[in-house]
């Protein structure tokens, strides 16, 4: 990041999913589209997706990176890898601690499984807002509304569709957008052509009206201004609705629901748009808390001018770069070449080079600004869960009790 990326334009997110729901496929699509939007992907024909992804898989850097930085619509999205297996509960918690929002991914056929429930509870514990993506709408037996009910019943979550699917299985063609009031039909490049309200097919009109009403009701309940308009039967503009959805999502009062098929390139770009619209930036979340040496509680605000504080959330051994310590900077600026203090270990440390991992390259950066995520090369004594800060202003950030350091080969 350069200082051009303001804090409001950062999204630190992860994908939570039950195994096999399509997390890898969705991540690859996200990296493809975000890479493409930056001209990283090379070709523009219909097969570009596969060519590019095969290459990426061969190189093996795409998904194995603990945090991958991508750009979408002028926003920097740091996609943090969250393990989807139930055995890695601690790992899930560790990553939830440092991200600001998640995409909760469900299979349109399998729905809510015990594992998904576990991960959902963890996100609840850390108060992380989520948007829901019901994937695999193209599969036989896909049932959007059944999965929606399961989310509401099993997870007790106020899941509110922002779209409803047009068809399912091999008849899945697109969506009706309940915020914009239009129908969107996807082609194989995921670029939906959108039409106006009148173009919503006749047979879908009743379903559309029913769910639009539901959306307005649920969102109005969270917002007084909207409620007044809703009760007075006044028109609520898409922009107002979007702002209210964003605010309610940040507070976990609602969970916006989208759907599509990552495998068939349907709906992933809309999902990215929703990440930008609805999930919080580092300044939308409460300041991080910590403990000062005298035992007092303190907060650090997401400002470059505040005292530096960062949390190490993953340590990996990289074949080429050696020991990589992934950090999230909460306040101040982490400078390469500077000396910092590991307050958890009571050790002074020198910051070596700092890298930002992109899907297809590593970028050496001079500093990480607050709100940002990157990896420091060669921090000798730091393990997962440690706080890094300035020696003059020590603090130990509220961290999860990590039972043991993790060192895995990337
Ligand atoms: P993960 O375990 O959650 O990472 O799931 P994967 O992304 O590896 O996907 C599991 C399987 O589901 C793979 O065979 C994918 O090709 C397939 N898959 C993923 N997304 C979709 C989808 O939208 N539609 C269909 N039909 N298959 C999908």
Image (cartoon, rainbow, N blue to C red):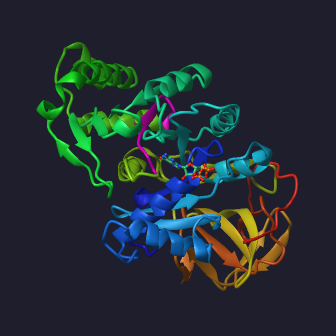
Left-right relation of 380 to 162: right
Q: Is residue 316 visible?
A: yes
Foreground pick, 399 / 323:
323
- Above or below for 139 versus 392: above
Left-right relation of 356 to 195: right
Foreground pick, 66 / 243:
66
Residue shown at 60% from the left, 77% from the top: 59
Q: Residue 112, percent across and down?
A: 60, 30
Q: Look at the image and say whether residue 252 sits in the magenta stretch.
A: yes
Q: Which residues are magenta?
A: 250-262
Give the farthest residue toward the top. Answer: 231
Residue shown at 30% from the left, 70% from the top: 45
Left-right relation of 246 to 407: left
Quarter of the image with the C terminus in it: bottom right
Give the farthest residue toward the left. Answer: 198
Residue shown at 12% from the left, 31% from the top: 198
Q: Residue 241, percent across and down?
A: 29, 33
Q: Look at the image and say whether residue 216 sits in the magenta stretch.
A: no
Q: Residue 390, percent across and down?
A: 70, 70
Numbered circles on residues, count: 0
Q: Is residue 5 visible?
A: no
């Amino acid at each position: 990041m350069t200082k051009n990326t303001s804090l409001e334009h950062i999204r630190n997110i992860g994908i939570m999913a039950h195994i096999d729901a399509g997390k890898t496929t969705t991540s690859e699509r996200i990296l493809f589209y975000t890479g493409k939007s930056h001209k990283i992907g090379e070709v523009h024909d219909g097969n570009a997706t596969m060519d590019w992804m095969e290459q990426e898989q061969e190189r093996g850097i795409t998904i194995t990176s603990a945090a991958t930085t991508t750009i979408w619509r002028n926003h920097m999205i740091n996609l943090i890898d969250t393990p989807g297996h139930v055995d890695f509960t601690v790992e899930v918690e560790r990553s939830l601690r440092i991200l600001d929002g998640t995409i909760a991914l469900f299979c349109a056929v399998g729905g809510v499984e015990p594992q998904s429930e576990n991960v959902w509870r963890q996100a609840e514990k850390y108060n992380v807002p989520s948007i829901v993506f019901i994937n695999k709408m193209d599969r036989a037996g896909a049932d959007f509304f059944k999965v929606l009910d399961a989310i509401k019943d099993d997870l007790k979550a106020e899941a509110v569709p922002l779209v409803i699917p047009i068809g399912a299985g091999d008849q899945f063609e697109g969506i009706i957008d309940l915020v914009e009031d239009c129908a969107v039909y996807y082609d194989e490049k995921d670029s939906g052509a959108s039409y106006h309200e009148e173009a919503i097919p006749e047979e879908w009109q009743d379903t559309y009206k029913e769910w639009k009403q539901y959306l307005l009701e649920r969102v109005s309940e969270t917002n007084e201004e909207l409620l007044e308009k809703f009760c007075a039967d006044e028109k609520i503009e898409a922009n107002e609705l979007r702002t209210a959805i964003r605010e309610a999502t940040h507070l976990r009062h609602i969970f916006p629901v989208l759907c599509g098929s990552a495998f068939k390139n349907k709906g992933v770009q809309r999902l990215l748009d929703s990440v930008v619209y609805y999930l919080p930036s580092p300044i939308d979340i409460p300041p991080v808390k910590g403990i000062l040496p005298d035992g007092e509680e303190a907060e650090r605000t997401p400002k470059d001018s505040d005292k530096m504080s960062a949390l190490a959330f993953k340590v990996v051994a990289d074949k080429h770069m050696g020991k990589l310590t992934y950090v999230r900077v909460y306040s101040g600026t982490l400078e390469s070449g500077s000396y910092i203090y590991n307050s958890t270990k009571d050790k002074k440390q020198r910051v070596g080079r700092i890298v930002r991992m992109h899907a297809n390259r590593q970028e050496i950066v001079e500093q990480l600004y607050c709100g940002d995520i990157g990896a420091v090369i060669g921090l000798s004594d730091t393990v997962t869960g440690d706080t890094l800060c300035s020696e003059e202003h020590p603090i130990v950030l509220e961290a999860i009790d990590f039972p043991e350091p993790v060192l895995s080969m990337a």
